[in-house]
């Protein structure tokens, strides 16, 4: 993947990350560029998958998703063929993230749900049915101090 980014690309990313709804005209104004040139650059950033999509940030509490848990998962396969586990975890709607990790465990899953009963249901009805899972350790978050998706945009 060709991800060479110049100064203008980085400025576009910074502005779009601050405001995902910024219009092409406003981007062009901020960058002192023609709207057509900015639009072409944004399309290239999308094609290169530097910009991977556009979403709305929703407050989980507004949807009654008050429980956040991280589950450390150990596989019977070690670092072997874990495609089945990764595919199964990715299909669980409440699983927001799945990471392959170094250390004692193999994976880390971030799960957000309504309450502990629902988390137990997911563990019993979904995780337990994945044959290659050897063990899990669950950590429930009491309070989130910082959670963000924004990346640090480097300065050239």
Image (tube, rainbow, N blue to C red):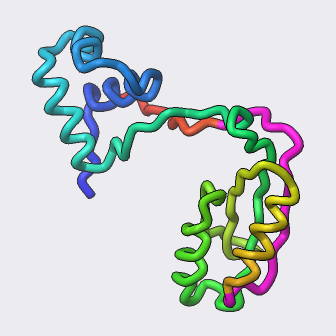
Q: How many marks?
A: 0
Q: Quadrant location of residue 1?
A: bottom left
Residue 19, compared with residue 104, is above or below; it is above
Residue 66 in the image: x percent, y percent?
79, 42
Q: Quadrant location of residue 57?
A: top right
Residue 80 in the image: x percent, y percent?
58, 89
What residue span does the magenta drawing correspond to?
131-147
Residue 30, compared with residue 50, is above or below; it is above
Write the residue at 76% across / 58% down.
70
136 part of magenta stretch: yes
Residue 149 in the image: x percent, y percent?
56, 39
Q: Quadrant of the C terminus?
A: top left
Side (left or right) of 76 relative to 136: left
Write the residue at 26% across / 43% down.
46
Q: Quadrant location of residue 11?
A: top left
In front of the other: 104 or 54: 54
In front of the other: 125 or 45: 125
Write the residue at 30% across / 49% down.
49
């Amino acid at each position: 993947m060709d991800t060479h980014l110049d100064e203008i690309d980085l400025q576009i990313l910074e502005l779009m990350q601050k405001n995902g709804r910024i219009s092409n005209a406003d981007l062009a104004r901020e960058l002192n560029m023609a709207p057509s040139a900015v639009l072409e650059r944004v399309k290239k950033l999308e094609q290169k998958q530097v910009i991977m999509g556009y979403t709305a940030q929703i407050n989980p509490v507004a949807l009654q998703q008050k429980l956040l848990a991280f589950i450390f998962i150990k596989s019977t396969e070690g670092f072997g063929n874990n495609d089945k586990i990764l595919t199964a975890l990715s299909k669980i709607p409440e699983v927001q993230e799945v990471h392959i990790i170094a250390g004692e465990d193999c994976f880390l899953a971030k799960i957000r749900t309504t309450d502990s009963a629902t988390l137990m249901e997911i563990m019993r009805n979904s995780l337990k049915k994945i044959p290659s899972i050897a063990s899990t350790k669950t950590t429930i978050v009491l309070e989130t101090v910082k959670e963000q998706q924004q990346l640090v945009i480097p300065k050239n």
